[in-house]
Structure formats: C-alpha cells, structure tokens
Image (cartoon, rainbow, N blue to C red):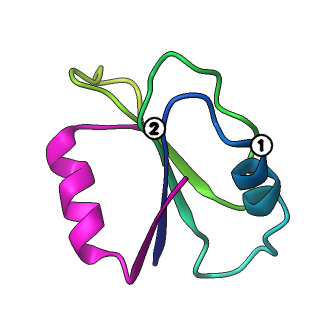
Amino acid sequence: MTLHLLKGTPNPLAVQFLGSQPPSAASPVVVFLSSRNTTPALPQCHVYRLAEHPSAQAEDTLTYEQLLEMIFKADRVITW
C-alpha cells in the first residue's frame, strides 16, 4: 500500500497526480492531516481525514493511533 499524507491546503500537484491514478486493487490511501479543508474528489483512492476526536458515524476519519498504524503497515509513505 502507498500512503499519501497531505497537510494544510492540498497541493494542486498532489491532487492532480492522485486524480490521474488508474483504478487498481492496490488503490493508494490518502490522509488529509487538516480537518479544515474540503476534500477533493479522488474516486480511485481511499481518502481519510485525521481527527483528534472522530465521531462514531464518520467512516472517513482516523485517530492519531490509526494513522501511526497505517504508516508502519504502508510499503511507501509520501508526504506532500
């Protein structure tokens, strides 16, 4: 798995790159490290948002502990 970490305002180059990825079984995982910004549409990626206190209903949020687990499980981690 390739894990992409986007901080602050999403980098336009990162969004363009991730948006152009072909669909595959090994879809990239994207985590937005800021909860303030709107998440761009990336249908071929699994997109999550980091939250200090995620709500039970929000499937697309991660805790810091879950993010740390993802980092150690990933084959590659790319920060933008």
What amino acid is labelled 1 in the image?
Pro
Residue furthest top as drawn: 36
Q: Is residue 77 above or below residue 60?
A: below
Magenta stretch encompasses residue 17: no
Depth check: 78 or 62 in front?
Answer: 78
Instruction: Report the side of 78 relative to 15 (left or right).
Output: left
- In screen coordinates, is 5 left or right of 71? right
The x, y position of residue 55, in whole percent, is: 30, 20
- Give SS at disc 2: loop
Disc 2 versus disc 1: nearer the observer: 1
Q: Nearer the viewer, residue 61 or 75?
A: 75
Q: In this view, which residue lies farthest toward the left?
A: 65
**Residue at x-position 73% and y-position 60%:** 18
- At x 58% / y 20%, what residue is drawn? 37
**Residue 14 against residue 51 in the figure, above or below:** below
At a point 65% along the width and 22% down the height, the residue shown is 38
Look at the numbered disc 1 and give the secondary structure of its residue: helix
Q: According to the image, label 2 marks what residue? A: 60
The label shown at residue 29 is none
> Within the magenta stretch, is there residue 70?
yes
Mark 1, other Cα within 10 Å: few <14 / some 14–19 / many ≥20: few
- Tell me the distance, in whole angstroms, between the alpha carbons under discs 2 and 1: 21 Å
Q: Amino acid at mark 2?
A: Asp
In front here: 38 or 46? Answer: 38
Direction from residue 59 to residue 20 in the image, left or right? right
> x, y (%) of residue 44?
73, 61
User: Who's the residue at 77% across and 73% down the image?
Assistant: 23
Picture layout, residue 80 above or below residue 20: above
Q: In the rendering, at what x and y percent does residue 52 appear?
A: 22, 24
The stretch in magenta equals 60-80
Earlier sequence position, callout 2 versus callout 1: 1
Residue at label 1? 12
